[in-house]
Amino acid sequence: MDSKKPSRRKFLASGAAVAGAAAGAARSASGQTSTPAAAEPAKKNIKELIAYGDRSRFVTSLREASEGRPSPDAFGLTFHVVTPLGESVGSITPSSLHYVAAHRGFYVPDIDPKEHRLMIHGMVDRPLIFTMDELKRFPSVTRVHFVECIGNRSTPRRNTVAQTHGMTSCSEWTGVLLSTLLKEAGVQSGGAWIVTEGAEEVKGASSVSMTKAMDDCLVAWGQNGEPVRPQQGFPLRMIVPGFEGIYQTKYLRRIKVVDRYYMTYNDYGHLQKDPKVVALTNQIGPKSVITFPAGGQQLHSPGYYEISGLAWSGGGAVRKVDVSTDGGKTWKVAELRTAAHRMAHTRFALPWTWDGKECDIMSRCTDEIGTVQPTRAEVAKFWNEPLTPQFTVKGADNTVQVWKIASDGSVRNANFL
Amino acid sequence: MRTSSSARLAFVLIFGAALNAQSPTYHLGRAPTPEEVRAWDIAISPDGHELPPGHGTAKEGRDLFIERGCVQCHGRNGEGGKAPTLIVAKGAPTNAGRMPGMDMGIQAPGLMAVSAPYATVMWDYINRGMPLGREGSLKPDEVYAITAFLLFRNDVIKSEDEVLDAQSLPKIMLPNHDAYPGHPEWKHGTPRLRDYP
């Protein structure tokens, strides 16, 4: 009955392309693998083999434009692209698949790191300007952190986990602690905020409180074992752990210590009239999503599967993930399969046997400060609003994602049913 | 003598410690020149103290809006183009708390220009981000004039001849001047909002 809806057909078709590896099957039937591997001529001394490795031609997971706004837009620009979380493995996002968000469409600057400078000035005793080489001489730290866009949310139009949750990615970042640089410059009394600014065409700038700046922010040049990728801010970017993406200034060239919230274009555009909503915008709440089985994917038969997903929180490390396979009636504690770093994606898994019947599956994250990921119903109740498909979670949406597995094994977004 | 030497030692210890707390540890980097700071110091505070010298009027801005190509994307009257609406129709909402240009199709009515709380934000954004593809090409006089033009056409300033400069711009009151509550204090290891589920 559902299959007669055109939106559902489209949804399954895109799901097949996106879900490939995780859902298994299908692809090998296309005839590409008919020649045994041993019959392939040995590849010798090709550039790809020696210089920079590619993934297998059989691995096809790709980013795609977020459906939130038409891409390309009226200017022919792509706005945001999402990580294919449905095929994600472990907790680190490959740099090539990291989600990308831009202030106003993609303009990735082509920056020569030899020419790049970082200036720290404003309310400091010693204004300083650094080359990249000088920054790399400071004591460095390497930390795993997620980055997430404030617009990363499930909607009735978003059916795959890439579209509902793909505007978050997780990398191992290497850089110097911002506190090290600020101490070197000597913050003057009254220096309560910083403005961080990029070198790209619009010179994106955001205000960050001095408390956060001195706590755990990174000025990063390394990502997953190599320099930060151009789409992620090469050669230098801010990492503001656990805060929404717009604070994580890319192409970082300037930090100014100031006395107030500076109300930059980025700042005021993200502010709301209701202070309660403002409080729900900067730090990401505890959040999780099942990435398999997830919307658009297909279970081919009843039997054993491992439910797998990602959990994270802007408030600290993931302490616990619960999984329900009966629509939230009962919950089981999932195993954490990767180290639970602070403000980092953490892989969870639950062994599970599907009996072939329709069911709703979901996950729920508890973080180290004891905050629990809410359901849409709980959030609607907090705002005293009716829980309808139109109810929109205010601020950053960290609500529980429900996937419905039909008796034919197809999986779809059940948040708005 | 004994007293004086221990006093001197105490002085050295205290002064030395204070000096130590304030002096750099790694001695990397160098001091930027005043010219380097001026060239990059483009984020404009609500009090406008970073605003450069210069001035402009709405009358000058009306011509510059065409000459500098703003009309090509924003439309002849600041609306109806493919870029965000800059001139709000009378009585239209000013949309506090909406990200300008970030909405669906970037065409939502009443966005941009006067949705900011301070005129300094408008000046800042035109200066750093416009025109698209030729960012940073406008001179301060031109940015003052185009800002004045948008403020005049949005009924914020009343005269086409009113001169905007570093002193007058920060004093302008926009409709959303008090619409934004500012940021709550952030503390390490605390939930976003008390009693939120």
Image (cartoon, rainbow, N blue to C red):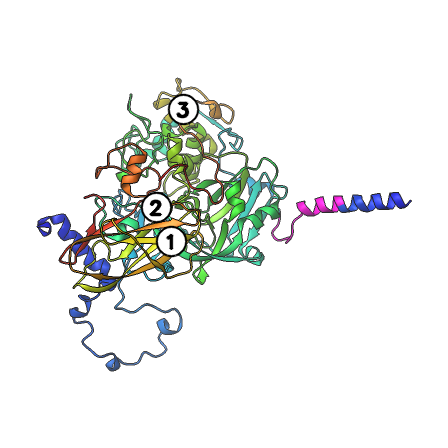
Q: Nearer the viewer, mark 1 or mark 3?
A: 1
Q: Earlier in the sequence, mark 2 or mark 1?
A: 1
Secondary element at tag 1: strand
Q: Nearer the viewer, residue B33 or A143?
A: A143
- Please state if A274 lies on the left or on the right of A134 as rendered: left
- Estimate the x, y position of residue A217 in percent, counting from the top left: 50, 48
Separation of disc 3 and disc 2 at Cα?
39 Å
Secondary element at tag 2: loop
Q: Nearer the viewer, mark 3 or mark 2?
A: 2
Separation of disc 1 and disc 3 at Cα?
47 Å
Residue A373 — which label? 2
Q: Amino acid at mark 3?
A: Leu
Note whether residue A59 is visible.
Answer: yes
Secondary element at tag 3: loop
The residue stretch that appears in magenta: B14-30
Q: Which residue is mark 3?
A: B174
- Estimate the x, y position of residue A62 in percent, counting from the top left: 28, 59
Q: Is the residue A50 above or below the residue A8 in the image?
A: below
**Badge 1 vs badge 3, beta-carbon distance below 8 Å:** no
Note whether residue A63 is visible.
Answer: no
Query: Are the residues flagged by discs 2 and 1 from a single subunit?
Result: yes
Q: Amino acid at mark 1?
A: Lys
Query: Are the residues flagged by discs 3 and 2 from a single subunit?
Result: no
Q: Which residue is mark 1?
A: A320
Find out whether residue A87 is within the magenta segment. Answer: no
Q: Residue at x 57, y 49 (%)?
A: A181
Q: Residues within 10 Å of mark 3 (few under 14, many from 20)?
A: many
